[in-house]
Amino acid sequence: MSNELELKYGCNPNQKPARIFIQKGELPVTVLNGKPGYINFLDALNSWQLVRELKIATGLPAAASFKHVSPAGAALGLPLSEVEQKIYFVDDLELSPIACAYACARGADRMSSYGDWAALSDVCDAETARLLAREVSDGIIAPGYTPEALEILRAKRKGGYNVVQIDKDYRPAPIERKDVFGVTFEQGRNEFVIDETLLENLVTDCKQLPVDAKRDLILSLITLKYTQSNSVCYAKAGQAIGIGAGQQSRIHCTRLAGNKADIWWLRQHEKVLNLPFKADIRRPDRDNTIDVYISEDYMDVLAEGVWQQFFTECPAPLSREEKRAWLDQLSGVSLGSDAFFPFGDNIERANRSGVQYIAQPGGSIRDDHVIATCNKYGIAMAFTGMRLFHH
């Protein structure tokens, strides 16, 4: 280990020189394989913080799938149902708890996770390495690797896959700094602890928060703590199922995340599960095709005859009525927001995706309207009193 690591370039090839370094002591990361770049390390260090906090808060193994300094997915190491195994394309693998966590983190939004950076709270085992080996991914950060896992990962991408180990005991300085346009910004690190005490101020008529809902709300809030703001996260069954990141309008966050949650649920529809794919279709093409099949564009694709590239026979469309009937069965979804909801339209949109539990800071001048909208749908909402902006 050393206090400095030179990088090929910064965010873009023209941004040279580039390096990561630490003022005092040694870097907490060791590159075990590959040559991680500037954005890789931004993803690695942000994603590690997320999974570390999830593990501390829940006691469960945690994983994240990061793209462009925001999570595409985050999940806990809970057993997968048969349907989840199928839609995450891991039904042919043996899965350890940490492998289950990564399968969910990557699988809930496979379109966004394409070319991701993976983060694990626990030592990477062979089961997780085998899963990663067949996916398009840029790299991984973990507190350790079994010898077999390291051997598998070092063979990925013709030996160029990025493997980073982090010192799990490393604690950064309490003050953090960054430069923007030659000006140095300084602030205290966001060390705010997210736990169930944040969920005690239930402001709606419904005061019921089941154990699973509390777990999912904690997961969503910790995920938002490391998501570029504005951000909203839908969660269910110990995994983020829809993340809306970096939007200027909160309703656009809620819609974006809600649409992703809808796609997650629609992928479990019988018609989608039984799509007649050709045997040799590539995994990314299959993901793209499923996305198109679920979308409103499928009829156009059908008319163009493009389906013949991917299917052995032309699948019947999933009608708008079938989609709505299936989405109406989705329930028990938890939703976190990194700042207050200014209008009840966010609740209206969340309700359409099965949201029954919400955690948000509160503090809007229209809180009464937001609460009334929750009461209309029997949604339980907690005011956390804590904003979670991340930039």
Image (tube, grey):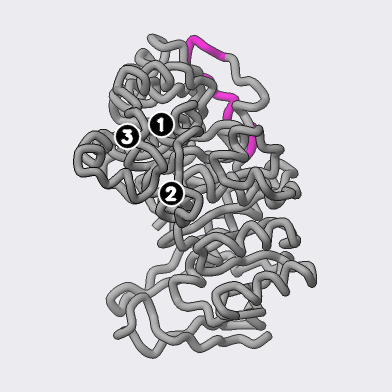
Q: Secondary structure at mark 1?
A: helix
Residue 300 in the magenta stretch? The answer is no
Q: Earlier in the sequence, mark 3 or mark 2?
A: 3
Q: Characterize the local packing of mark 1: few (<14), some (14-19) or many (20 or more) Cα atoms within 10 angstroms.
A: many
Disc 1 + disc 3, Cβ < 8 Å: no
Point 38% across, 31% down: residue: 363
Q: Amino acid at mark 1?
A: Asp
Horizontally, residue 292 falls left or right of residue 30, namely: left
Q: Amino acid at mark 3?
A: Arg
* Image coordinates for residue 145, horizontal then vertical, percent: 74, 68
Q: Judge by depth and name the residue closer to the eye, 134 or 38.
A: 134
Which residue lies under the disc numbered 1?
Answer: 262
* Image coordinates for residue 338, horizontal then vertical, percent: 43, 41
Q: Judge by depth and name the residue closer to the eye, 51 or 110.
A: 110
Horizontally, residue 27 falls left or right of residue 322, namely: right
Q: Earlier in the sequence, mark 1 or mark 3?
A: 3
Instruction: Evaluate whether residue 293 shows in this view.
Output: yes
Q: Characterize the local packing of mark 3: few (<14), some (14-19) or many (20 or more) Cα atoms within 10 angstroms.
A: some
Which residue lies under the disc numbered 2?
Answer: 286
Q: Earlier in the sequence, mark 2 or mark 1?
A: 1
Q: Compared with residue 219, is residue 199 higher up or lower down, i.e. above or below?
A: above
Q: Compared with residue 120, is residue 335 higher up or lower down, i.e. above or below?
A: above
* Image coordinates for residue 385, horizontal then vertical, percent: 48, 34
State which region is magenta: 195-207
* Image coordinates for residue 378, horizontal then vertical, percent: 46, 11
Rendered image: mark on residue 255: 3
Image quarter of residue 163: bottom right
Image quarter of residue 13: bottom left
Q: Judge by depth and name the residue closer to the eye, 93 or 202.
A: 93
Point 37% across, 42% down: residue: 291
Q: Compared with residue 104, is residue 26 higher up or lower down, i.e. above or below?
A: below
Give the distance between the C-alpha atoms of the residues marked 3 and 2, in whole angstroms.
25 Å
